Amino acid sequence: MIIDHKKYDLFGKPLLHKLVLKSPFTFDFPITDNACFLYMLEGEMQYKLDDEKINLPGKHSLFQNCINSDKQISNENLGNNNEIVIINFHPDILRKIYDKELPLLLKSQKNIVSNKSIEQINNDFLIQKYIEGLLFYFENPSLVNEEILVLKLKEIILLLSQTSNVEAVQVILSQLFSPATYTFKQIIEAHLFSQLTLEETGAAS
């Protein structure tokens, strides 16, 4: 059950969310065209990874590509309140705020081949302080404007580039700016009931 949901939009798209959820809950992400950063402020949540449920405790965070990964979090325990902060990373917004050149963290890495779409980030002091700063703006909405939101988005990108998870975060973020690469198996499954020529399947080899 959602007890409280505050959010701020940037350029017409949701950027920051603060959710209070009462257990048991199941929360489906309404947006699937971006990456998102989830910080477990209080309580805990479970998410699915390779058909296994993984627990995310308080003060830990999760970074995922919402296009390719599971789009649901949950908590089956009874009666607990769970507070979550979510930051969305929309490709078009990132291109707009970095109009000169994308930072290295967002650039496609041609020499890296990975299907990784989710990464758990353990308790990180700098990220914890960043979240505390975000809470101030949720408590003082009159101070929030477009410039502040752009700065906070750039700040979390900078902080993520300094964590020990930077390589995984870079792989996940760069997927937003790369054309989809399909395996031979995915092409066959997508055209199971149609006839494919050798030329059409050649792109997967």
Image (spheres, rainbow, N blue to C red):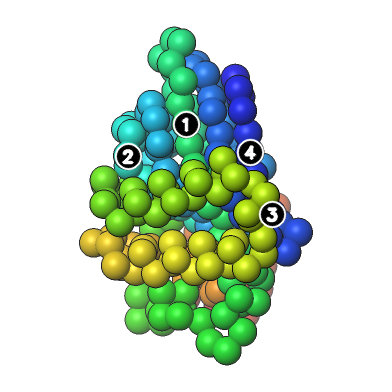
Q: Local crowd at mark 2 within 10 Å, few (<14), some, or many (≥20)?
A: many
Residue at the disc numbered 2: 59
Q: Local crowd at mark 3 within 10 Å, few (<14), some, or many (≥20)?
A: some
Q: Are marks 2 and 1 in contact (CB under 8 Å)?
A: no
Question: Of the residues under marks 2 and 4, which one precedes in the sequence?
Answer: 4
Which kind of residue does numbered mark 1 sit on? Answer: Glu
Q: What element carries label 2?
A: loop
Pick the front one: 190 or 74: 74
Q: Where is residue 191 in the image (x, y as percent from the top left)?
A: 66, 58
Residue at the disc numbered 3: 9
Residue 178 falls left or right of residue 5: left
* Vertical comparison of 20 with 142: above or below: above
Residue at the disc numbered 4: 6
Which kind of residue does numbered mark 4 sit on? Answer: Lys
Pick the front one: 80 or 56: 80
- Residue at 65% from the left image edge and 77% from the top image edge: 96
- Residue at 48% from the left image edge and 36% from the top image edge: 84
Which kind of residue does numbered mark 2 sit on? Answer: Lys
